[in-house]
Image (cartoon, coloured by chain):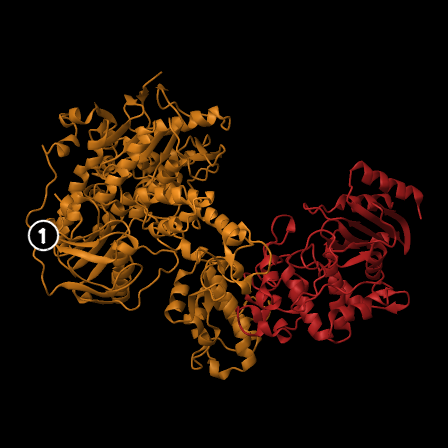
Chain colours: A red, B orange
Amino acid sequence: MNVEMERKIDEYIAGHHYRQINSVLLCKDNEILAGCYYNGFHENSKNAIMSVAKSIMSVCAGIALDKGVIQSLDEPVYKYIHEFSKGLEPFHRMITIRHLLTMTSGIYWNGGVHYHCPMMQQLRQSGDWISHIADCAVVDIPGTRYNYKEWDVILLAKLLDVVCGDMYDFINDNLFEPLEIEAKRWYKSPCGIYYSVGNGEDTDNESQFKLKATDMMKIGQLFLNGGTYGEQQIISENYIKQAVTPLKCNPGYGFLWWIWEGQYGCRGYGGQSITVIPNKNAVIVTQATPTDRGMGYFDVVDYCREILI
Amino acid sequence: MNNNIDIKNARIHNLKGIDVSIPKHKLTVITGVSGSGKSSLAFDTLYEEGKRRYLMFSGTEFMVDAVQTFDSITGLSPTVAVEQRIIRQSNPRSTVGTKTKISAMLAALFANYGSCSPEYDDGQPLDISMFQKNSAKGMCVKCLGKGVVKWIDADKLFADKNQHIYDVACELGKRSSTRNMLEEFCGKYGMNLWEDKLSDLSEEQIDLLKYGDGGKTKFWGFIPWITMLTNGSVTTSGRLAFLLKNEGMMAEKRCVKCGGTGLGGKASHTTFGGKTINELESMYISDLLEFVKQNNDEKNPLLKEIITKLSCMVDVGLYHLSLSRIVPSLSGGEIQRLFLASYIIAEMDSIIFVFDEPTIGLHEIEKENLMRIIRRLVDSGNTVVVVEHDENFMREADYIIDMGPDAGIYGGCKIFEGGYHQFLECADSKTAGYLSDKIGFKIKREYRKTNSEKILTISGARLHNLKDVTVKIPLGVMVGVAGVSGSGKSSLIADTLVPKLKEQLKAKCVMEETEDDEPEEDMEVTLTGVNNIKHCYIIDQRPIGRSKTSCPATYTGIFDKIRNLFAESDKAKELGYTSGMFSVNSKGGCRKCKGDGVIHYHVGFGNFIDIDCDECDGSGYIREAIEIAVDGKNIRDVLEMSVDEAKDFFADKDKSICNMLTTLQRVGMGYIKLGQATPTISGGESQRIKLAKELSKGKNSKGVLYILDEPTTGLSFSDSEQLMNLLNELVDMGNSIIITEHDSYVLSNCDYIIEMGKGGGNDGGNVIATGTPAELKNNPNSIIGRYLK
């Protein structure tokens, strides 16, 4: 632990009046340098991880690929999700697993102001999420245009459920347990879709999937270490490389992982983040209580990287 | 307190330094022949200055004025204008409901008082955006709020196994945009575009053709590629869409998810008084008003407000519209009345209203209602200034200003200013003579005989509100189609007869290509007698050309010839300039304003102020182009000429230009500038320019059917008379004319009238009277009869 570094982070957060930040964790060379907690949070507190779960699903897809549960990322989605084999939209047959991982299915989505997801309301009312998404217009040729959306991960959750038997069990058995992460089962919609963000009720609801800051750190470390945890190869290095290779249509995105110059990571609504900085052998984690404006606190991450030297 | 608005030395456009004094809290009508300067006075001087001062006063304006266009205006108060032409270019998605905000109020009504059917009720409260099909929350996810979905039938495209690959999708593979990509694609997957038939290919190969190889080669596969081509995302290919639709390979179908409502499941299954919001939006406004009244409980403030707004719309003669009707499909007159309604609802006083021919598109009965409403505006303390040609309107005016004597440079003078009765005595006015019957509009008393062998018969028309209409339209004569707004005139002519003519005459039926969605079609109706028609020209009021820089000169094709004249001048030849130098869309365009001549500044409240471009001094041309002159005039000077002036100018220079200009004069367009920008050309003017263009093509044609829609819109008495003479000449030469019309003078000069009615909307849709104007005058069923001259 580096007391000086923790003091700097405390000062920075106090100076910017970031009252919603709950934890900041900084790790270099596999060693935690700073662990700052606020608002009564501590090492064992859990915070909703929001869309960081998307990146965990990417890990799940990678492991499924490693294990041969899926043959290739270019397999068409309709092979596993029969609603997409009916020809409801001419482009349905073209959508592949890769498109789901890269937010390029082409299905219409409007994320709304501050990503409040107005389109989720009709989905939740629909009773059958997959049929509802299969009814949505496909406005771009699959694979051609990046558009961050919930649809693609919901379809991926369904697909992984089909191929793995149960997606959460698969993640738990193949990722959380080896990484010594204890977690509660993800929220499952009444129609049987795992959805980490939960049932849509606001503020700290029970259905949101939560992790400790140190759990998130382990996932960042896993990527930094080429897929190994201790002696164990959890996920192939090959998949990790692909997952953090920039897309042609969006250089800032890989397989449900974000990519920036010299770093990559995961982002969740309202300040949840994992940032991996390979050339400094470092990982930074932040957690916060989301506000309506969806503050990201990326400056905190930048600041942490600066004080790393 | 100043009781008048005094304008001193107004000199914009062709105005010749005129002084006028407009009484406040009165109704003033500005009249005069077309192009005489009425609009320059009412809109460009009075309204522009009123708007400018109001914006300056409210602090939202910065002030730059290129040239002072008058010496002084005193007595101004906030001014609103309702022009017809500017509003034409409105948002293609806005509807009568969104424009009047009644849709938003209905959405609020449903969110607060709607009841949701149990199978869609998830216990969550309703909210307004769920009832708005352009909101992400409310829209149907399949059609995205449009209610219709484009459908490409992949199986049908590939059904004929005998076709070659290049035959697929109406020979798409032969098109240059597709050929190379597809050739390469076929090569890669062991196919030959030119030799292989579909029966030679494997299932996998067919699948590859349909959906491509996921982007490994340039060709996306037929289905995605056709989608892109017909969406206009690559190039606009209306033709491909047309061909595919004809073959039944592509269609616009009612959205199966929302059933055409454009809304999500919960919203489409929420009702108020037993009706869904969509049902209410597609009702005629008069019926909707009745419905809302029946469900009014006197306590609901929302309902009260909706009733007020709807009543007002009925008052201004918009009872035949529905809230779902899109604004671009409205006529200029309807749009103006829509705005009028919203002002009346606002209940303001001390406002100056400036209207541009508000009676356009109105039946005589409706004009009387409109008069009452405008009178109400005046009585509640407003000042109303109206540019108008309508006789009854002038009779009602408190004050008349007559501009003239002629158009363009031959106009711009104030001929008369004062009360109606004095006006009748005014010998200098070209208008007063018609009013006092000193000249009098020529009224036909001898009608051409109809020939029972040359008749078009429409049977079983049921489109929109048409009630199984069967009607005989005599050919070889001038036929007028009359009826109140919404009585079914357009449904019968533009939406039933025209599509049928197109279907049977194909290329011999000429009308402007439109990019609009396919109109609804009536498949049951039959049309006989088309063999009597050689050609058909449909001349509507849609704008000429879509670009901002299109103008009468470009549309009629004379601009190319004019540019050539400039390019052939000695100086241009010497400098090596080609005709492209004299086009703002080509080499000659000013770099800064892109040829517009003005720069558009937003000054808040959705208002814009145009400032002349300082780079080209407002000419839109680069200096090199402006420096070339033909007979002392540069290209800009020529575009500023009216048709009348230009005809003199080109008299000894180019015969074909002169011929076109003569035709334009004959349709009453002598006053229009060659370079007048499309957005400032009214629907009536557009129509007459189109008519001139068609006339110039087939000079001595016979057996042609011309279909026109209120061709005298915006024309003064003398110009109307001239146009009617021309149309009569056409008929004398052996052609036929069908005119949809309200104007009693025009109708009186037809040989045969078909009157639709009796009311609008559900009350309409029947033929209530047919015969010569004289017969209709004595027909008790006819409504228009008593207004005929």
Quadrant in which residue A211 is drawn: bottom right
- In the displayed structure, would residue A113 be above or below residue A108? above
Q: Position of residue A71 (x, y in %)?
A: 71, 75
Q: Position of residue B374 (x, y in %)?
A: 30, 34
Q: Position of residue B637 (x, y in %)?
A: 32, 33
- Residue found 39% across the figure and 46% down from its top: B547
- Residue found 42% across the figure and 43% down from its top: B304
User: For the residue carrying disc 1, how many other residues have a C-alpha within 10 Å: few (<14), some (14-19), or many (20+)?
Assistant: some
Q: Quadrant of the C terminus of chain B?
A: top left
Amino acid at circle 1: Glu
- In the displayed structure, would residue A170 be above or below residue B414? below
Q: Quadrant of the N terminus of chain B?
A: top left
Chain assignment, label 1: B
- Residue found 43% across the figure and 74% down from its top: B167
Nearest the viewer among B36 and A148 is A148
Quadrant in which residue A200 is drawn: bottom right
Q: Secondary structure at mark 1?
A: helix
Nearest the viewer among B147 and A305 is B147
